Amino acid sequence: MAIPHIFQGSWITNQTFADLEPLQIFHRQLDTSVQVKEDLLNQHILFRKCFSLEKPPAQATLFVTADDFYKLYVNGHFVAQGPTSCYSFSYNYNTLDITPYLHEGTNTLAFHTYYLGYVNRVFVSADHQQGLLCDLIVDGKTVLSSDESFKTAVHTAHTAIGEVGYHTGFMERYDANAPEVDFELPEYDDSAWTNALKRKHQRYTLKPQPSEMVFTESFEPVHTEVRGDTLFADFGQTLVGNLFFRAKGPKGSLVSIRMGQELKEDGTVRHEMRCNCVYHEEFVLSDRKADAFAPYDYKSFRYAEIKLPQGCTVVPGSLVFQARHYPFELKAKFLGRNELEKKIWDLCVRSLQYGTQEVLMDCMDREKGYYLGDGCYTLITRCVLTKDFSLFPVFYDDFLRTKFITPTLVTCANCGLVQEIGEYPLIMVFTLLAWEHLTHDIPKIRTYIPAMKELLDNYAKDYAREDGMLVNLDKWLVVEWPDNFRDGYDVDLQEGKLNPVAHVALEAYYIGAIKALNRLCVLCGEPIYRDSTALEKTFMKLFYDREAGLYRDCESSSHHSFPGNMFPYFFELIPEERFKQNALAMIKEKRLTCSLLFTSFPTLAALQRDGEEELLHDLITDAEAWPKMLADGATTSFEGWCRESKWNTSLFHLTLSDAAAFLADFRPGDAFHFSLPEKKQNA
């Protein structure tokens, strides 16, 4: 492991932020007493530093971070962007080899930093902490560190003209006449800029970013078409990143850009997207030779329309999609059975390749959220496909850090918005079974067992009633989402309401997590966490309907739902053999029409584990599941089986890429055995 870098530089910022006291923005989800002050929005703050080298460097390493984010240019070349969002008490910095970009004589570092200013799922922002920190080491010597000799300015080319999603970001007007345009070029004159200021409050504990950085690659459109005053472009697939082009025209001309994931019936771009994002930006031209459209924030789209005023043109060959994503190398083998399964495989692989950003977020448009529940299944699938397991400890460490908000953890990590969903941390416990199965890295797994014990202890302490069942959670419970895929689950799951009724899905998750942890303890050579026998008996007594041979949704209901039986089946809560046969019959009858983001993976995993291969492949290729996405024109996995699955369907959502995990040579279903290992148990 590399020795952490000790920064010589200081956190620098501009006059607006220099003296601001950091705000405390974290609280429990139901706590309305915390009032967040969101008075500084959409701040684009630039920094520049020129320096000289006597000779070309043999090795030049830049250690850098920013709050909320930076984009780095060296001598006019875009180099990198980061860091992955994180909390100030465990803040990421990046280590960059910039040797190829430096030369003898004068060199220029230029940074475009960003402070969003909203409490959302993207950044830890709205906390009044903005700034840049860096050290440059050349051939073993520190040649510069961030200090007040850096020049700074606000990038006035960027003006917000609309919001995206749930305070997720801004649509902007980019004005090529702004004096800060071309700030990254060495010849740019920054003499009118002010000197940076040191941050008065520098409350960070720094660590090297444990994951790789996103990179950018360019895609040309597969089809372009001039439609009157509008240039239409289709990039052939939904991607994540930015539209880039150069345009010429009279000074002050206003170019309108609309982007979307689908087309309207008349063939125009649906920029008012069904995921509740409006992708409309503007570009004001200057009288230069050719202006570059340079948006900062990324979006998820396939199509674009560029409406050009009279006398304006797009420079031929300049139009590209600058896609950004996490490194991806497919190493798994496809073990599907037919051409349809290969199409599903390709859909899911492409989704994970181009959809994974700094983290495993759910969607790259509406929320850009790093979700614990969704993320567990996406994490497993991505690791199965790449056979790269480095994101497992990153994922677990990120979410375990959220215990500073509540010991039973929160839904989204590394962001300011606090949401709590009761099942998600329990999914995290049994996902360790997949990690152990895929890697057999017992020493590493063992390091997480104390945290899992602590998590389950806190669930019991805060929510367990006398018989051990969990009730009155001050967390939202989703069971399945959206609610039209719950198969009439007969429990009031209204968000923000404490539910005093014990119900089958939550209790199955809880007992399943205990059983998973017991199994892991034995595999690691440790005593079991807790005997689950009494809890299992209570569970079956409360919920199992022996006459029907199925589980009821809750202790006060007679309804038998799909999720209410799939979770007990997955967690091997089998009161009698008849239940297993009835569960399989329910799957054959209802298929995945009553399953989506949270029931599908456990159902498929249980089938693979139990050798039900024909039914597994039958479900994956069912016309109402992944083939329905394909029939609906999907190039990446949707947030549902079709565009109309929910009121705000994202057409690039990573959770349902999980079909690929069950078509690969690594079999994740084999991980999910919840009884104690037989030999260890007998010993």
Image: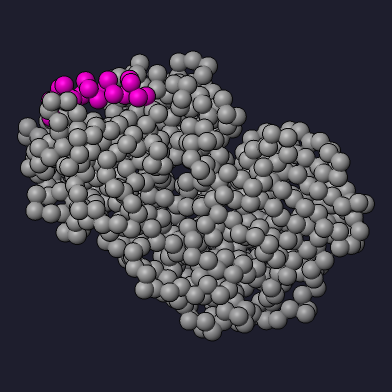
Q: Nearer the viewer, residue 552 or 337?
A: 552
Residue 63 in the image: x percent, y percent? 55, 64
Residue lying at 53% horizontally and 66% vertically, measured from the top left:
118
Q: Is residue 292 magenta?
A: no
Look at the image and tell me whether residue 147 can be seen.
no
Which residue is pictured at 71% across the width and 65% down the height?
158
Magenta-span inclusion, residue 576 = yes
Q: Is residue 137 above or below residue 555?
A: below
User: Looking at the image, which is closer to me, 648 or 87?
Assistant: 648
User: Percent x, y for residue 295?
Assistant: 69, 56
Q: Where 83 sits versus 532, above or below? A: below
On the image, the x and y values in percent for residue 57 come to: 67, 61
Which quadrant would the C terminus be assigned to in this image?
top left
The residue stretch that appears in magenta: 575-591
Residue in the picture at 33% in, 52% down:
494
Query: Is 493 displayed left or right of 544 in the figure?
Result: right
Position of the N terminus, as image quadrant, is: bottom left
Give the residue drawn at x 42%, y 71%: 25
Report the predominant secondary structure element of the magenta stretch. Answer: helix
**Residue 659 visible in image:** yes
- Residue 595 is situated, as x and y percent measured from the top left of the image, at 37, 33
Taking 296 as reference, is 569 left or right?
Answer: left
